[in-house]
Amino acid sequence: MEGLVKAAVLALTAVGLSLVFGVMRVVNVAHGAFFMLGAVLAWTVAQYVPGDPMFGWFAALLIAPAIVAAIAATADTFVLKRLNYDPEATIVATIGLLYILEQAALSLFGPDAKPVPAPFNIRLQLPWFGYSGYKIFVVFAAVAVLLAVWWFMTRTRAGLVMRATQVDRQTARAFGINVDRVYAGVFALGAGLAAIAAVLLVPISQAHYLMGGDPLLLSFIVVIIGGLGSLRGTLVAALIIGLSDGVISMFWSPTLAKIIATAAVAMVLVFRPQGLFGARA
Amino acid sequence: MAAVILSAKALVRSFGGLRAVDGVDLDLLSGEIHALIGPNGAGKTTFVSLLSGRIAPDQGQITLAGEDITRLPAHLRVRKGIAYTFQITSIYPRLSVFDNVALAAQARGAGNLKAEVHAALLRVGMAELSNQEAATLSYGHQRLLEVAMGLALNPRVLILDEPTQGLASGEIAGFVALVRSLVPQTTVLLIEHNMDVVMDLAQRITVLNHGKVLAQGSPTEIRSNRAVQAAYLGVDHAET
Amino acid sequence: MKIWILHIAVLLALVLAQLVLPPYHANNLSRILVLAVFAMGYNISFGYAGLLSLGHALLFAAGMYGAGMLVHHAGMPALPALIAGGLAGGAMAGLVGLLALRTAGVSFMIVTLMFAQVGFLSILYFNGVTGGDEGIALTGPQRQILGLDMTQDTPRFWVALILFAIALLVKLALVQSRFGRLMLAMRENEERSRMLGLNPFGIKLKILVISGVFSGVAGAAYALLFGYLGGSFASVQYSILPMLYVLLGGAGTVLGPLLGAGLMFYLVDFTSGLTSAYLMVVGAALVVLVLFAPKGILGTLRERWLPWLP
Ligand SMILES: Nc1ncnc2c1ncn2[C@@H]1O[C@H](COP(=O)(O)OP(=O)(O)OP(=O)(O)O)[C@@H](O)[C@H]1O
Ligand SMILES: [Mg+2]
């Protein structure tokens, strides 16, 4: 179950990163910061909503990703667009963005970890184990969001426009597609997905201004192994890594597991840049 | 008859389903000016890219003065004396003209850079532009800078990919004289769309069409070749 | 000629600064000089050759731990340890380069970042040897360089300045040499270089190794001069800092790293007195620089008024 929850949250986060890279060719180093922001904002929203934690959490699920998406769209318009999406300059800029967001969270919310209560506390009692109902809910919610993303990308006009832009920016522009709007939208969507993942996860872990590092690293790993920019590969890789993460850390210390995973992924990039699965979605 | 310096045997290279070069044989004779012509997309650039090592052939063999260089990486072929000037201008835009040519000269280990660079620039008539930033040169001068870089390499075989494209007609006359002055020390393989230049310079001409050799011979033979007229000159006329 | 006079003048100004500045600032200057050596190393690969690495912390840490471990565990004297640190930085750069240089552009950035992360985590993991997060403090007797005591401000400054001067003059000679031209060729047009008979992979590997030696010496000097080595010096932040210094001062200029390191050091020093979120300055500086001044201070100066500036 832990593995499934991890895989679900990871898949959401990584799909956000992959989408941004796939369509915009932007490596968003601030992706983890958007994740963190989602969690911290969820805590804030939950603070202000009285009554049952259920209301606070659901309010957070709506509001936090929206705010994060708005911040991302702003960053795209005022920074990335002006850099003409030059790959190297945008990486430097998103590193800057990462520092700014992290430090802003530190100033505004302080250095402590903040708990967010789960919206409900049902335990599913099976003969052998008890399952936290919330964790099961997280898995289903993540799958639902991923399906929605898939539907959006393949079945709606906006998604079609995004995919057209991915194939060829110039041609898309020639066909009257407002590429600037599409890019801002994709960047916001990517960040929003990270934020949704964070809101889902935050009742299980906690909100902290430095919590973005691990999701960032893991998303990178997933996206690279799945093949840069391939959504299908990303999903498969998220599942494998989320599930195996628990297994690996049973044998090794978390640090050693990270060392091995990071080194292995770097090797994948060096020797198999098309990813382990190679298929392009 | 002069010795064969560079020889291609049954070269094949495909892009996806397209056989851009489809079994081409070509022998370059030492000291000749050999023109390679053919309609757009005939596979000329691809063919000389195989010779220079920019891309690898699927099949076939390339020999330089009898030595098999089919598997040799591009930079080592250049060291052995095959120089290539790009069809799409490729220079160091933010470096000075001097530095551009100096890189070529120092790449083959020239001793006195200043003198060698000056000599190469003099030959293309750009000696006074030595300190100018390459990006700020006119297009014609950028083309000539590429040629100067090729000259500074002191190559045995110089491959020129549409060098007169973008030159003013006044500049072309000077260029023709320059190329003629290179032989017989250097062997020249010239890809060229300007028929006057080709007929003027080339001792032999090879015509490529759809990746295959359509005809080969002296300018007079090529001019009177029916197949060539149909495939190539005909197309050219239809376009203009 | 003009060029050498300018750089000697800068060195003399630094001598003078030590004599007139109050101890606090003179001490800062020592740190700035060592960090500037690191940034010069970064500039060699990034500014001149266009290799945008996000993993130079690994090279800095290789020097720092290369020297620090030898001093701490093997009792090696400081000067040979300093040299060993430089070699460690170069060797690490060679190792990373052999792999990372098979990639380019964005992949190169990510791969170098990941290798550096592996190094950082390894330092934490092997905390028995490296001291991990807490690090290792070097004692006074371990910090004697040619009879100069690195626990004292003034001798420390002189050693820092000598190191910086050597690095500066070596770099100046390097960028004006034939090899310096090759470095620019890698940045400007790799395909053209290949077709001139140059081997880009080999040249870039050499550049990275030189960059690694600079970074390694800087890391070793940092440990020996300031008496401490710790895992945090291998963290991502220490890959970003030299990039920031170089971007600020001017990528591809000899004096840019010094200028950038000095300005950024004081900017962070100043804001960390005001807020715990001082790293925001680093972030904001990065964004502002890539947006509005990608050439940095000296790069812009060179473009507008001083075309001869190396
Ligand atoms: N890298 C590539 N990938 C896919 N197709 C290519 C590639 N390079 C060339 N082609 C195709 O191979 C064919 C031959 O191209 P090539 O550039 O060799 O022609 P060319 O004779 O030099 O034409 P031109 O006179 O226009 O320069 C063309 O159809 C071209 O589209
Ligand atoms: Mg061509």
Image (spheres, rainbow, N blue to C red):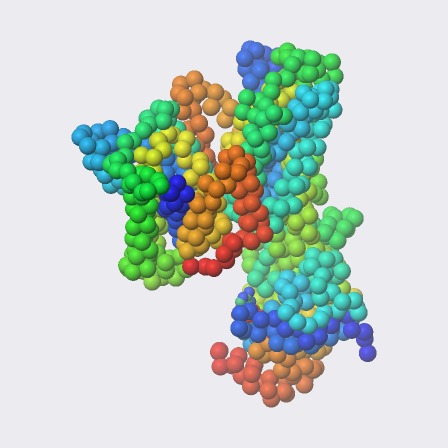
Q: Residue C20 placed where, x, y %?
A: 59, 12
Position of residue B224 relative to residue A266, above or below, is below
Q: Residue A271 placed where, x, y %?
A: 59, 52
Toward the left, the furthest residue is A51
Q: Residue A197 placed where, x, y %?
A: 34, 42
Determine the image quadrant of residue B159.
bottom right
Q: Residue C206 placed where, x, y %?
A: 68, 42
Residue in front for this viewpoint, C173 or A136: A136
Residue at image coords 72%, 19%: C75
How many numbered discs sit on the rendered protein?
Answer: 0
User: Residue A112 vs residue C37: left or right?
Assistant: left
Is residue A71 shown to the viewer in this render?
no
Residue in front for this viewpoint, B94 or A110: A110
Residue at image coords 69%, 13%: C141
Determine the image quadrant of residue C217.
top right
Residue at image coords 47%, 23%: C268
User: Residue B234 vs residue C41: left or right?
Assistant: left
Ligand 2 image-quadrant field: bottom right
Residue in front for this viewpoint, C181 or A199: A199
Determine the image quadrant of residue A70.
top left
Residue in front for this viewpoint, A84 or A58: A58
Q: Quadrant of the C terminus of chain C?
A: top right
